[in-house]
Image: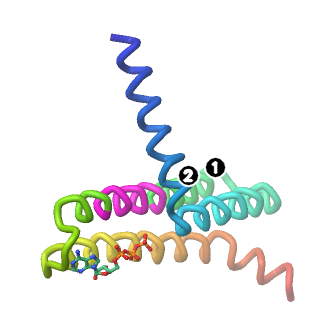
Amino acid sequence: MLRRRVASFGHAVRGVTSALGSEVHLRFHALATVVVIGLGWYFGIGRLEWALVALAVGTVWAAELLNTALEAVVDLVSPEYHPLAGKAKDVAAGAVLLTALAALVVGGLVFGPRVWALLS
Ligand SMILES: Nc1ncnc2c1ncn2[C@@H]1O[C@H](COP(=O)(O)OP(=O)(O)OP(=O)(O)O)[C@@H](O)[C@H]1O
C-alpha cells in the first residue's frame, strides 16, 4: 500500500518535471514563482498574504499542468484537424488565462502598493 503511494507520488513528480522540460510556459511560471517568493520574503508579507499568493501560484501551476495533459490527450486522439479538438484546446487555454489573470490581481493587490511606495 505504502509502496504504491510512493510510486504514485513518483509518477506525479515525473509528470511535473516532464512538463517542465517540454513547456516553455511552465518554465516561465517557475521563474515567476521564484520572483514572487523573493518579493514576498523581501517585503515581509503577512501569513494571509502568503496564503493568497500560494493559492494563486498553485492554481496557475495546476491549470497549466492540466492544460498540458489535455493537449497531449487531444494530440493523441485527434492528430488531424478537428473543430472539437481545437475547441478543447482553446477552452483549456482559456482556463489557464483566467487563473493567470486572477494571480495578477492577487499579485497587484499584495505587492502593488509596496512596490509603489518603494519607487515613490
Ligand atoms: N487537432 C487540432 N484541431 C483543430 N485545432 C487545433 C488542433 N490542434 C491545435 N489546434 C488549434 O491550435 C491552437 C494551438 O494549439 P497547440 O497544440 O499548438 O497549443 P499551444 O496553445 O501552442 O500550446 P503550447 O504553447 O503549450 O504548445 C489550439 O488552441 C487550437 O485552436
Residue that badge 1 annotates:
47
Specify the quarter for ligand 1.
bottom left
Numbered circle sitting on residue 51? 2
Location of the N terminus (image quadrant):
top left
Along the line of sight, which residue is nearer the eye, 60 or 105?
60
Does residue 94 lie above or below 31 as drawn?
Answer: below
Q: How many marks?
A: 2
Q: Which residue type carries mark 1?
A: Arg
Camera-nearest label, 1 or 2: 2
Side (left or right) of 112 relative to 65? right
In x, y percent, where is residue 47?
A: 63, 49
Side (left or right) of 46 relative to 43? left
Along the line of sight, which residue is nearer the eye, 25 or 36?
25
Cα–Cα span, label 1 and label 2: 6 Å
SS at mark 1? Answer: helix
In x, y percent, where is residue 117?
A: 81, 81
Label 1 crowd (10 A; few <14 / some 14-19 / many >=20): few
* Mark 1 vs 2: CB contact within 8 A: yes
Does residue 24 lie above or below 83 as drawn?
Answer: above
Along the line of sight, which residue is nearer the eye, 86 or 81?
81
Q: Identify which residue is drawn at 48% across, 57% down.
A: 61
Q: Which residues make up the magenta segment?
A: 60-71
Q: Examine the residues drawn in magenta and state their main secondary structure.
A: helix
Does residue 117 lie above or below 110 as drawn?
Answer: below
Which quadrant of the figure has residue 44?
bottom right
Residue lying at the far bottom in this picture: please name it: 120
Numbered circle sitting on residue 58? none
In x, y percent, where is residue 48?
A: 58, 53
